[in-house]
């Protein structure tokens, strides 16, 4: 399996697979209930992972050929 495919699965596992374990109101982190903080954290992490995938994808290494 390519590294790009593995990286694309990580946000799915982290966001949906972690929900049963973090379904708590307490503690509050940055003024957010822990569950909401978990979702916001994974949105930020997903953005970073997608940036890495974009850089690793060989189709994006070619110049503008139009």
Image (cartoon, rainbow, N blue to C red):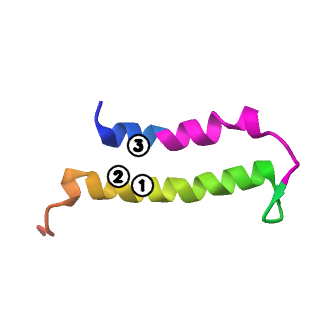
Q: Position of residue 14 (x, y in %)?
A: 59, 40
Question: Mark 3: which secondary structure?
Answer: helix
**CA–CA distance in space, label 3 to label 2:** 7 Å
Quickly name the residue at label 1.
50
**CA–CA distance in space, label 2 to label 1:** 5 Å
Q: Are marks 2 and 1 in contact (CB under 8 Å)?
A: yes
Q: Position of residue 17 (x, y in %)?
A: 63, 33
The answer to which of marks 3 and 2 sits earlier in the sequence is 3
Quickly name the residue at label 2.
53
The answer to which of marks 3 and 1 sits earlier in the sequence is 3
Question: Mark 2: which secondary structure?
Answer: helix
Q: Position of residue 22 (x, y in %)?
A: 76, 40
36 or 26: nearer the viewer:
26
Counting other residues with Cα less than 10 Å from the Cα at mark 1, is it few (<14), some (14-19), or many (20 or more)?
A: some
Counting other residues with Cα less than 10 Å from the Cα at mark 2, is it few (<14), some (14-19), or many (20 or more)?
A: some
Q: Report the residue at 54% width, 55% height from top.
A: 45
Q: Are marks 3 and 2 in contact (CB under 8 Å)?
A: yes
Judged left or right of residue 62, residue 35 is: right
Judged left or right of residue 54, residue 58 is: left
Question: Mark 1: which secondary structure?
Answer: helix
The number of numbered badges drawn on the structure is: 3
| Chain part drawn in magenta | 10-27
Quickly name the residue at label 3.
7
Q: Position of residue 39 (x, y in %)?
A: 68, 51
Judged left or right of residue 34, residue 8 is: left
Q: Report the residue at 70% width, 50% height from top.
A: 38
Q: Residue furthest right?
A: 26
**CA–CA distance in space, label 3 to label 1:** 8 Å
User: Which mark identifies residue 40?
Assistant: none
Q: Residue furthest left?
A: 65
Is residue 17 rendered magenta in the image? yes
Counting other residues with Cα less than 10 Å from the Cα at mark 3, is it few (<14), some (14-19), or many (20 or more)?
A: some
């Amino acid at each position: 399996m390519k590294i790009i495919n593995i990286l694309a699965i990580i946000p799915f596992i982290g966001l949906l697979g972690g929900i049963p374990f973090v379904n708590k109101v307490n503690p509050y982190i940055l003024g957010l209930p822990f569950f909401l903080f978990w979702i916001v954290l994974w949105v930020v992490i997903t953005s970073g992972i997608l940036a890495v995938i974009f850089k690793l994808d060989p189709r994006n290494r070619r110049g503008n050929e139009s």
